[in-house]
Each structure stands twice: as structure tokens, then as C-alpha cells.
Amino acid sequence: RRPSGRRQMTESRSGLPVVVQKYGGTSVATAERILAIAERIEQNLFRTPRLVVVLSAMGSTTDELVTLARQVSERPSGREMDLLLSTGEQVTVSLLGLALQQRGVSAISLTALQCGIRTDGVFNVARIRSIDTGRINAELDAGKVVIVTGFQGVNDTNDITTLGRGGSDITGAALAAALGADACEICTDVDGVFSADPSQVSSAKLWKEISYEEAIEMASSGAKVLHPRAAELCMECDVPIHVRSSFHSRDGTWIRGGTEVMERAEVVSVTSDSKIAKVTLREVPDEPGIAARVFQDLAQAGINIRLIIQSASSQDRGRITFILDPEFLDGARELGKAWEEAGVASRCVIESDVAKISIVGSRLASSPGLAARMFSILAREGINIDCISSSEMKVACVISADRLDDAVLAVHQEFFPEPRSDAAAV
């Protein structure tokens, strides 16, 4: 079962440590890429003979399954939706198993049930409760590469549950923690963790090492290379994470503990998230229990909140604003109608044309002027700030979605300026 606290090494009878590798959907998007991953794994076995591989579904398979479900159901969710979505990873692990066997590599693919990944009873956004590593260790001791379906587990009645978007990262981290792995490698379509999304900012800086805390904040703020829950699991059990490319063997970014990393820089990343929606409750009565009711209703509906801003009250009325993922919009709309009818708010306003930009660092709260620099740059670019939220390691602004790219480029240039050429300086 997954250890709590510091890492507990669980080596095999051979005394060799385990490495867990997770490959995302783009890394296994085609048969050709699966064959390339099989070749890569065969080469890895010379230095890492005990290897566990976690796979996502191929390419856009999960999105295609969601689209298919919406053709037969207005709001597909629950047990049947998880059963449907879990099929993508089962295809991928089987194909990689066949590809490895073709190369003469002994391998076995396992579903979540077969390798004992137990979750709570929440469909669509389940959390891992425990992992029985007996089967995995037995297969590793037999000299096999163990290939595991990411993104899923089973509850107490053996129904398949999924872990939410990016859940394969969580599977990889949980297995690394449970097995006491030397490392959890997140193999993806970028070279590591950058100071910004390299597809948005060509001059983004590749970090060789960052802290768990920085990685969690970056992931929570929109960086897409790692799920925040995966970083939290590895931090709890002191398992280093190596975010690296699936397409070459160079080192990427190491994520681990250490105060030296925490004191290195003020701002380590400019992150953005265009897949959000904003919900505003207007004229909320300024009385005890109202906010509690709102967020209890959201919790009971299984709606995860990303950001909360509550304005000061005026004339015994206030305003509550929160940010959520678009997938929860239908549920939020239903709650909004109920709140209006119950007098919790005079109106529930939902906006989906918004985005979030954040600066993330280790000492933002104790470094005067960083937030002001961010706000000044946005003002200079004529970008209006809708909402602001801050913490010890993050300053986040909600802005119009159509200005997000401009905002990211300008803010990144402020904190990570490109050297000017002599010609440009003249």
C-alpha cells in the first residue's frame, strides 16, 4: 500500500530499485510512436531492469469518447462514463505490450483492478486510497516490464473509476510512491518544465531543477506538464520527479525537495489557463452562513473550485466570484438558478470568455514590487484585470481570453527579458 510520510524503499529480492515512467497521450498517439516507445524502453532496461510503465490513451481518444457519449446523453457522467473512458488506456497498454513482445522484451499489461489500484467511491474524479503492489512486484521479480493503465482505479465493488483529466500523472506518482521508486519519470512532448509554455513563448527558459512546491503551484496555475496531485504525492513520499521528453534521451527538469532550490529565484514561471469559466453571485446577503451554503452546494454537486474572490459588502450586500473548469458549467448553471430562487443571490452570472495568467515563485509575498510589476505591464498593454488572487507563491489575474497570448508574452518579457542585440539597442 502507498506509504505515508517519507519514502520507504521496497526493493525486490534482487535488490534492484524501481523506476516508474509515465507516457502521455501525444507520446503514444500512433502505432509508430508506440513502436518508438517500445524501442526506448528496451534501451532503458540496460540501466533500469525493473521498470513500470504507465500509459495514457492514444492522442485525442478520451476527447473522442466524451464526444461520442454526448451524442447519446445530454450530461454523460457517473459509472457508465467511467467505464467508457477507461477503454482508451486499455487499448494503449495492450498495444505497447505487443510491441515489446515483438522485440523479445518480456512484458505484461495490467488494468487497475489487476494491479490493485483502489479508489474512493467518487466517479469521474476519484482519488486513490491504496495500492496493493504484490502483483506488480511479482511480475518485476519475474523479469517483466509492467505496463499499467493510467487515469483509473476500482472502488470497493470493483467498479472502474477515473481520476479526472491528467489522471495518468497521478497513477504514475502513486505507483512510484507505493513501490518506493528511485524516480517517477513524466515523459511528455516537451523537454521539461519551462518559465512559460514554449508553444506561447519561444524564449521560455528550461529549468534543470525546481522544488515540489514550485511544481505544485505551476501545475495548479495552468502549466500542463504535470498534474498538481502527482507532485503532491511524490513530495509526500520524497520520490524525485523527472519531467523529460519522450522523443530523446536528454535530461529534462528534476523536481525534488531542498531549500537551495526554494531560495534560487523570485519568479520561476508565467503560467496561463484559457480553459476556465467565471461565476459571479451578485447582491449576496451579508450574513453568516451564506458563503458556507454556496460552497457546500458546490461540493455536494462534485464541482471543484479553482479560485475564490469575495468582495467587501456594501449596504448589507456582497459579491462572490469563483473560477471553475468548463466541465462543471452545467452543474453551476443549475445551482445558480436554485440560488436565485432561494434569495442567496439576486443573479448568477456565468462568463466563459475569460482566462487566467499567473506568476509563480518561491518568495512572492516577501519580495515587494513583483505584483506591481505584473499589474503595470498588463496596464501598459491595455489589458484589464477582472479579478486578482494572491498567495505566498502565486499572483493570479483573471483577464479577457482574447488578450491572454499578449499578456503572457508581455509578463514573461518583464521577468525573463531577452538580451537585446546591438542593432536593437541603437
Image (tube, helix red, strand yellow):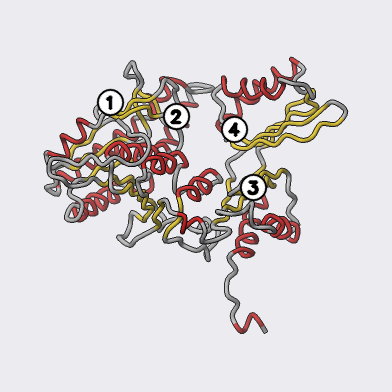
Whether the residues at callouts 2 and 3 have beta carbons within 8 Å, the answer is no
x, y (%) of residue 344? 75, 20
Marks 1 and 2, how far apart at CA: 25 Å
Choose the circle earlier in sequence order: 1 or 4: 1
* In the depicted structure, whether residue 222 falls above or below residue 175: below
- Counting residues from the start of the chain, the first of labels 4 and 3 encountered is 4
Q: Residue at x 36, y 21 (%)?
A: 155
In depth, the one of 89 and 164 nearer the eye is 164
Judging by the rendered image, the residue that carries numbered circle 4 is 305
Earlier in the chain: of badge 2 and badge 3, it is 2
Disc 4 vs disc 2: Cβ atoms closer than 8 Å?
Answer: no
What's under tag 1, amino acid-wise? Leu
Residue 211 lies, with reference to residue 414, above or below; the image says: above
Tag 1–tag 2 contact (CB < 8 Å): no
Q: Which residue is mark 2?
A: 68
User: Is the residue marked by circle 1 packed among few (<14), some (14-19), or many (20+) residues within 10 Å?
Assistant: some
Query: Can you tell which of label 2 and label 3 is closer to the viewer?
Result: 3
Give how far across and how far down residue 326 sits, in percent: 58, 34
Whether tag 1 and tag 3 are in contact, CB under 8 A, the answer is: no
Residue corresponding to mark 3: 396
| Separation of residues labelled 4 and 2 (CA atoms) | 27 Å
Q: Work out which quarter of the rendered image holds the C terminus and state it.
A: bottom right
Q: Is residue 176 above or below residue 345?
A: below
